[in-house]
Each structure stands twice: as C-alpha cells, then as structure tokens.
Image: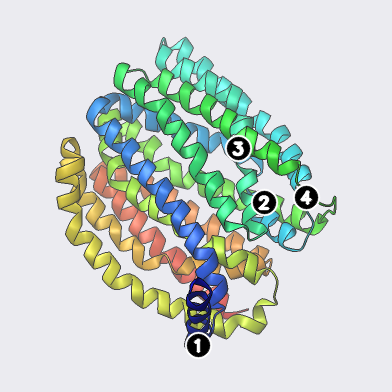
Amino acid sequence: MQLLLRNKILQLLRWSERYTKTDMVYVAGGSFWIILGRIGVLTISFVTMMAFARWFPKEMYGTYQFVLAGIDIASIFALSGLNTTLIRSIARNSEGALITVIKKKMKWSLVGSLGLTTAAGWYLAHQNMELASSFFVAAIFLPFWTTFPLARVFWNAKKKFAKESLYKFGPALLILLALFPVIYFTNSVFWVIFTTLVAHAVFEGFLLYKTIRQLKNNEQDGSAIKFGKDMTIMDAIAKIGKNFDTVILWHFLGPIQVAVYSFSYFPIKALNNYLPIQALALPKIGEKNVKDIKKGLLNKFFSLFFLSVPFVIANIAIIPFIYKIFFPNYLESIIYLQALSIIGIMIPFQLLETALVSDLRKKDLYVIRVGSSIFRIILLLLLTPFFGIWGVVGTILITEVVRSAMIFFFFQRI
C-alpha cells in the first residue's frame, strides 16, 4: 500500500512537470526537508522573540540588537562570499574546498575580531561596561561564529536537505534552551551575547567536525575561491548597508527605538532568510549552463511573483492580530511591519540573482550589491534624521525596488 501511494505521488509529480517545466521530484523532496527545517528554525526565532518581548526590557533589547549589528559588520572580514561559491564547488564534487574555506575564514575573521576589540576599548574608555564586555567576548568568538555554520552549506550543496535542515534546527533549538533562563533571570546584554556565542560555538562546531570526517575527496576549485573573494567585497558593502539602519537609529533615537524597529523588521528578515529559493536553486542551477535554462527560470520567476501578491496581502491583514496576542509590548511596531511586508513581493527576484551567481556574473553582481547598498546608506543618512523609523522603512522599500529592477535587467542580458 505504501509503495503504491509512493508511485502515485511520483506519477503526479512527473505529470505536473509538463506545466511547471521543473524537476518536481527534486523540488518536492528537497523543499519538503528544507521547508520543514526552516519552519522549525522560524518557530524557534518566534519563541525567542516572545521571550525577549515579555522578559527583556526594551532598552536592553535595543542594545542587544546594536551589538549584533556590530558583530555582523565585523564578520565581513571572514570572506562571507565564500559561503555561496562553496555550494558551487561542492556541487561539482570539489569537497576539499570545504577545508580551504574553513582555513581562510578562520584566518580573516581575526581582522574582524581586532575591530570588535577596538570597539570594546572605545566603550571601556567611555565607561560603558555593558557594551565593552559584549564587544570583547564577541571578538573572541567571531572566528567560530562565522566559520562553524559551513557544515550546513556543505550538506546543502550535496543536496542532503534532510541533514542540512537537522544541522540548522538542532543548534537553534539548543541555543534557545540555553538562552531562556538567561533572558528570564537577567537583564544583562553581556550574558545574552555570551550565552549565544558559546552555545553556537559548541553545537555548530561539533557538527562541522562530524562533516569534515565524512569528506570523500580533497579536490579543489580555485576559480570558485577567487570568485568567492570577489563576492566578499560585494557582501561587505551589503552587510554594512543592512546593519547601518540599526547603527543610525541607535545614534539618533536611542536603544528603545532600535527595539521597536527590530520587532517590525525581524519577520521580514526571517522570511528572506528561511524561504528555500536559493538553497534549492543554486545546487541545481550550478550543474547547468544558465543560458540553456534562462527561459525556464524566467517562467518560474513570474509564477513565484504572482503567487507572492496574495501572500503579502494576507500577511498585512493578520499582522495586528498576531502582535496583539504574542507581542503586546510592541504594538507600535505593527504599522512599520505592515509597510515592510511589501518586500515580500520582491522575494522571487532571489531566483534570478541565484542564476547570476551560478553564471559567475561578477561585474553585474558588483553593480547590484554594491550599488544598491551604497544607495541604501545614502538614503538612510538623508531620511532617518528627519523621519526616524519611517525614514528607515522608506529607505528599505525604495532600495529593494531599485535592487530588484537591477537584478531583472542584468538577468535579461545573460
């Protein structure tokens, strides 16, 4: 009976390929595990936010977000672009690239650690012990924070989506369990940062160790490493742009407004991070010539785009009810989140950007990522001092429209 049901499902998926022009068996099998894992992580993130909303003062949460922004900016030195190109290398069976990437990321992360140590010294000199101690411990753990999640990248590239999802969900759950008592019993940003970084290093480090022991060859991919370094420059500007909103709000409006803004933006970040478009597409596209599948990719893009519209409308409608139930201390965040939800319409552009990455369109990606990030920083500087959080929201929406238009333009030129 089970075999018969399985065969019927396979037949249905194969039949649907006539209309979707997609390997639906691959999508169904891969997306099931990826979506399951990401729903799990998204649930953990949601529960974590509930804990912060109920037990952690707004001022402390805003300070916590400021430290996280500093860590993310410092991580640009860890050659973040290698994460994406590693998928392409592993998909082409160059498993030895994992060891090379680990070594390079660990080494270059020390530059970011130096920056965080400098920040810690600055706040120590200004007698802000909370920020000084938080940035100092972040400096120690930055190499592990940026490198150990590579285990998930490896299994994604090998299309072992069940294992990738387990490696994502397991550490997230264990870190949450470690954080709960810290959030509840302390109002300390330092202890929250310390617990997060230590738990992350222990759990993610163990999984990376297990992954390394399962490598089957030591093949390298020099071109992908070089391209990864190029992408790091793009990612560096992009990371600064994405975290500059928190920094500038902190500077002009203080930690409480940072907390309000963070609670309006975290669902959008989660949606962008946990939808499996790039995770599914890059290993598959990496096996083929993008020019040969360009028309099919464009058809899939338009299908995703039109599906996203009712999703965004429904999201805007239910947001007030969710926040009143789960985040009653952050009701002022609702209106900002509803405005930011429009970004959901632009998520399908990730598919076209993934094609540019797979085709190694370095110049195009430079223009898209660096250009849009610089544009975002300029708008933040112009709008935030006058319009506060609305200035940040407007900047994000305008930038995403411009960025999506550039992605579409350069994809059409392939």
Q: Which amino acid does label 1 sit on?
A: Trp
Name the residue tied to disc 2: 154
Q: Determine contact: label 3, label 2, CB under 8 Å.
A: no
Q: Which amino acid does label 4 sit on?
A: Ala
Q: How far apart are marks 4 and 1 (CA)?
A: 38 Å
Name the residue tied to disc 4: 97
Q: Determine contact: label 1, label 2, CB under 8 Å.
A: no
For residue 7, side relative to residue 317 (left or right) = right
Q: Determine contact: label 3, label 4, CB under 8 Å.
A: no
Q: Nearer the viewer, residue 163 or 99?
A: 163
Q: Can residue 273 be seen in this view?
A: no
Name the residue tied to disc 3: 146
Q: Where is residue 373 in the image (x, y as percent from the top left)?
A: 49, 53
Of tags 2 and 4, which is closer to the observer? Answer: 2
Write down the quadrant of residue 176 in the picture.
top left
For mark 1, give the secondary structure: helix
Q: How far apart are marks 1 and 2 (CA)?
A: 32 Å
Neighbours of disc 4 within 10 Å: few (<14), some (14-19), many (20+): many
Of tags 4 and 1, which is closer to the observer? Answer: 1
- Vertical arrangement, residue 160 with respect to residue 18, above or below: above
The circle on residue 15 is 1
For mark 3, give the secondary structure: helix
Q: How far apart are marks 3 and 2 (CA)?
A: 14 Å
Neighbours of disc 2 within 10 Å: few (<14), some (14-19), many (20+): many
How many badges with numbers are in the image?
4
